[in-house]
Image (cartoon, grey):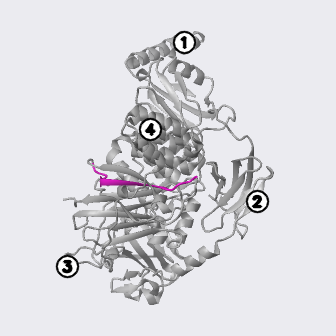
Amino acid sequence: MVIFFCKFIGVYFLMLYCLKPTIMRTILTIISLFFATSAFSQYTITIDAFVLDEHTKQPIPYVNIQCVGKDIKTITNASGKFTLTFDEDFVSDTDTFQFITIGYDSLSVEMSKLSKYLMVSNKIYLTATKKETLGNTINGTVFSGKNMTIQNAAVRIKNTFIEVQTTVDGHFEIPTKIGDTLVVDYIGMHEKEIIVSSLNSVNIKLKPNAELLKAVLIKGNKTKKKKRYVDTGFGKVDFNAFSLGSMLTSDDIGSHRVYLTDVLRGRIAGLNVAMGEGNVRSRFNSWARTSFKSATSKIRTQPGQPILSIRGQEALIFYDGFPYYGNINEIDVNTIDTIVVLKSLATTVLYGSQPTILITSKNRFLEKDENGQAIDAALVTDNLYTESVPLLSGTTQKSNYISALQNAKTYQEALKIYKAQSQNEKFQTVSYYVDVSEYFMKWNREKSIEILLNIEKIAGSNPKVLKVLAYKLEELKQFEQAKLIYQRIATLLPNAAQSYRDLALIYKNTGDYQQSLDLYKKMLANSIENIDFKSLEKPLLSEMQQLLRRYRSEVAYKDLPSNVLTTTFKYDVRIVFEWNTADAEFELQFVNPNSKFYTWEHSIIANKNRMLNEVKNGCHMEEFIIDEAMDSGEWIINVKNLKAAKAFSPTYLKYTIYKNYGMQNEERTVKVIQLNKQQEKVTIDKIKYQPAQ
């Protein structure tokens, strides 16, 4: 539907002949005044419509719509709907609107034709790009030994790029033909192969990998449980000394919860959470200033402040051992380590027999050095870095096809060699196009990108492979093309948390700031159906705050809390690692300027639950922060692959280094490496760190 505000007003004159002269004169006077006051006004045009598949009539998500040459653009949502608003005088009848997405022919239409069409229909149709298909498909369900369906199990056709993932219900449908071999695998399970003898629906049962589980148990027995303490106001007490029913830890909170009242409501038996009179606070609103008073002050209830009570008696609040009389929703939930609610007479005797809530922050019991600085627990053990690790650039072995290209003396000679190689079926691989694209960068940047885009042609429906392409396009700062690839991945993996985070990030990089913010809000509120974003909360919050810090004037942010809008948000260095296959196993090692190292391992043996959660929810990233560190100097980053890659799904690692993250002078560097080639530890980067003054 197109709404032209204040246009075609003249049609109302047709009704005036039926009115009495006095009434007609009055209306004519009003209309005359209207034209007098609006003659020099700009009128607003709003387009509300859907983009659908011409053949299936199904909505097409993530279609990019833009007026060519002008800053008027939008993107369809998951339901194929879009809204576009602009001033009438800003667009002429000859201006062209484009509709672009991967898998469909682009549509270009002039405004004059578009407006006429949308007067009679709010549906725009795109034609699917013609590609060779296998024609037939097979569907089925993947489940475990307990007859539980498995979400996000990988189902592929052996020796091809054809791959899909199972839905929330364990269901899949994949193009195939008689004689093909289906390969089904899931983390912690034995891989299973099935020869396609008919196209009837199949049920595939996966069995647990007993040897792998045994290794996990052996490793797990050595894991130490984190020691927690509570500041009672009268001393330090072991957290485990309290009743289980009245305890919460940071693991129970989750950074998607903005207010402490959201954390407590319904979590502690007998605890009632209410709001004081006069409260009109929405979930997102500004916060008042914190106030601490003396321990002898009487509990107050000011209008709009939360009231916590147990059995009708208002509770005392202690924060890090001190009485707290401010609004508890001013406490940043991300700083909390433990919450203990004391209810019985025996436990509250020290607090005047009044129900008491003890909140202890994560920094309360950190060890500090003589200068009062927190000591990093990861660096106090005997972990002096004494290794001699080679640089990545010095360990990469040249493939035969790269050696052949390097013999070329001219660009034309290199093109001739590439043409001959690309016609050989054995070179139709991801690694080939990535490597050759990198080689051609020295000759011609446009040709290098053209070669890289062949990956979409050979594996346009394989999300793992498409992610490699998106990584490389980001590395080359081809953000608009990367956006198209990430949108395609999101249509292939609509139940993967990473799909939406990647869209939000790439929208930020392409200047689609409002679309980016809208996605971040949905993810942090965990409001996208069938997807759990809890494991991504920390990086999501960092990225949304960075967006608001740098591009606040470009977005509507009035419904966000003031703590998210803080103007002091920044990190000295932020490093984000992402990998294209959720079951990738590798080890990262960070070495600080004092030659102390910290190792982070991503493997089924070291962290089974994390990897199972990642595969189930479709997320695969981790962030590391260096902020306000005492020592300046060089940080070293090493990596080692721990798992062999599958032939048609090589594992790639993208890492992004941000310096002065969130500041106007922010710097960003994106690099991509083929992880499965790094069987020995290598140094992938060195960072010069200087603490902010």
Callout 2: 10 Å neighbours few (<14), some, many (20+)? few
As rendered, which of 627 and 200 lies closer to the eye?
A: 200
| Span colored in magenta | 648-663
**Between tags 1 and 2, which lies in front?**
2
Image location (x, y in percent) of residue 327: 37, 66
- Residue 13 is labelled as 1
Chief secondary structure of the magenta portion: strand
Residue at horizontal 53 percent and vertical 46 percent from the top:
466
Above or below for 25 versus 387: above
As helix, strand or loop, the secondary structure at mark 3 comes to loop
Q: Amino acid at mark 2?
A: Asn
Residue at horizontal 52 percent and vertical 65 percent from the top:
643
Which label's residue is closer to the chain start, 3 or 4? 3
Q: Amino acid at mark 4?
A: Ile
Residue extending furthest bottom?
346
As rendered, which of 36 and 119 lies closer to the eye?
A: 119
**Between tags 3 and 4, which lies in front?**
4
Q: Is residue 325 magenta?
A: no
Image location (x, y in percent) of residue 491: 58, 45
Which label's residue is closer to the chain start, 1 or 3? 1
**Between tags 1 and 3, which lies in front?**
3
For label 2, the residue is 203
Callout 4: 10 Å neighbours few (<14), some, many (20+)? many
As helix, strand or loop, the secondary structure at mark 1 comes to helix
- Residue 449 is labelled as 4
Whole-number angstrom distance, CA of label 4 to CA of label 1: 60 Å
Residue at horizontal 25 percent and vertical 62 percent from the top:
634
Whole-number angstrom distance, CA of label 1 to CA of label 3: 86 Å
Above or below for 484 versus 582: above
Q: Is residue 650 magenta?
A: yes
Q: Amino acid at mark 3?
A: Glu
Which label's residue is closer to the chain start, 4 or 1? 1
